[in-house]
Amino acid sequence: MKTLIKDITNIQTGLFAKPAGIGELVYLQSKHFDEYGQLHAVLHPDLVAEGISEKHLLKDGDVLFAAKGTKNFAAVFENHNEPSVASTSFFVIRPADKKVLPQFLAWFLNNHTTQTLLKGQAIGTSIPSISKQVLENLEITVPNIEIQKAILQITKLRNKEKSLKQEIETLREKQIQQQIINAIK
């Protein structure tokens, strides 16, 4: 079933705030994610909760989409993380329809084809930005839940395969370098 993202989600912008260094909430920024869009394991609350509206608190299954800059990615917020709010670098996409898994939505937004389409519609030259309207009007095909889960499992296995290949290549390089060093001695 093809639909627009705005028809199956609620999208809001992140919150503009100045982290105090200590507090009750984590103010999530792009720097809290690695190059693959994975949230760093250790987060420290750096924002005072006083005056922060309940609507800005992230919920389990919210999809964060980094819309500013050259590194656009989507990540799913999980409730085992510290209580958090997203910075203005992100759109917070909250699935409104149980027919779409947050992880599938993040996969779709991270997909190369989707990324290319979004980057082609970014505005600004020094700091490109993807607008809320562009995101809302993005067309998505939503298969049934079982197919979504299968896609996610295949992706997880493919990423594991890539990681193992990289690890093998690194070990092989070390082995060759050691053999060269041994041959010189």
Image (cartoon, rainbow, N blue to C red):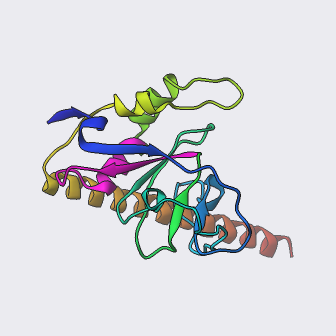
Query: Residue 3 vs residue 22: left or right?
Result: left
Q: Quadrant of residue 183?
A: bottom right
Q: What is the x, y in percent for residue 147?
A: 16, 52
Magenta span covers which residues? Answer: 89-109
Q: What is the x, y in percent for residue 171?
A: 61, 70
**Of all residues shown, which one is farthest toward the front?**
51
Which residue is pictured at 54% across the width and 26% down the height?
Answer: 122
The one nearer the camera, 18 or 114, is: 18
The one nearer the camera, 57 or 51, is: 51
Residue 39, compared with residue 109, is above or below; it is below
Residue 42, compared with residue 107, is above or below; it is below
**Of all residues shown, which one is farthest toward the right?**
185
- Can you say which quadrant of the picture contains the N terminus? top left
Q: Quadrant of residue 112?
A: top left
How many labels sit on residues?
Answer: 0
Q: Is residue 105 magenta?
A: yes
Which residue is pictured at 43% across the width and 57% down the height?
Answer: 55
Q: What is the x, y in percent for residue 59?
A: 39, 64
- Can you say which quadrant of the picture contains the C terminus? bottom right
Which residue is pictured at 44% across the width and 62% down the height?
Answer: 54
Q: Is residue 44 magenta?
A: no
Query: Residue 20 vs residue 93: left or right?
Result: right
The one nearer the camera, 22 or 117, is: 22
Query: Residue 179 vs residue 2: left or right?
Result: right
The one nearer the camera, 118 or 25, is: 25
